[in-house]
Amino acid sequence: MIKAIWICCDFDATSISLFTTAGLTADLEETLHMKVDVLKLPLPKETHLRIEKVVKCYGTEG
C-alpha cells in the first residue's frame, strides 16, 4: 500500500510562491488521502531522486 507520494511539478511561471506550493500540497493530500510532497522541476543534477514514472495531468504545451 502506498503511504506517500512525491509529485514533481513543472510550473509555467518562473517564480512560484511557497504559499502556492503549500496550497497545492494540502489540496492533493486531502484529495488523495495520503502524504504528498510537491517538488518543483527541474530537479538539480546532483539529486538522488529517481523518477520512475511521469504522468501529464493537465496543462498546455507551447
Image (cartoon, rainbow, N blue to C red):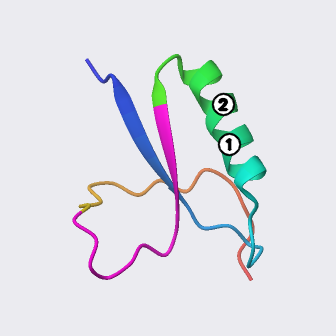
Estimate the x, y position of residue 17 in percent, counting from the top left.
Answer: 76, 60
Name the residue that disc number 2 marks: 26
Q: Amino acid at mark 1?
A: Ala
- Please report contact status of discs 1 and 2: CB closer than 8 Å, yes or no: yes
Q: In which quadrant of the rendered view does residue 10 lie?
A: bottom right
Q: Is residue 31 magenta?
A: no
Is 55 located above or below residue 10 in the figure? above
Name the residue that disc number 1 marks: 22
Residue at 47% x, 53% y: name it. Answer: 55
Is 11 left, or right, of 54 in this rendering?
A: right
**Quarter containing the C terminus:** bottom right
Residue at 68% x, 42% y: name it. Answer: 22
For the record, the magenta segment spans 36-48
Residue at 33% x, 54% y: name it. Answer: 53
Q: Amino acid at mark 2?
A: Ala
Is 27 located above or below residue 11 in the figure? above
Is 29 located above or below residue 7 in the figure? above
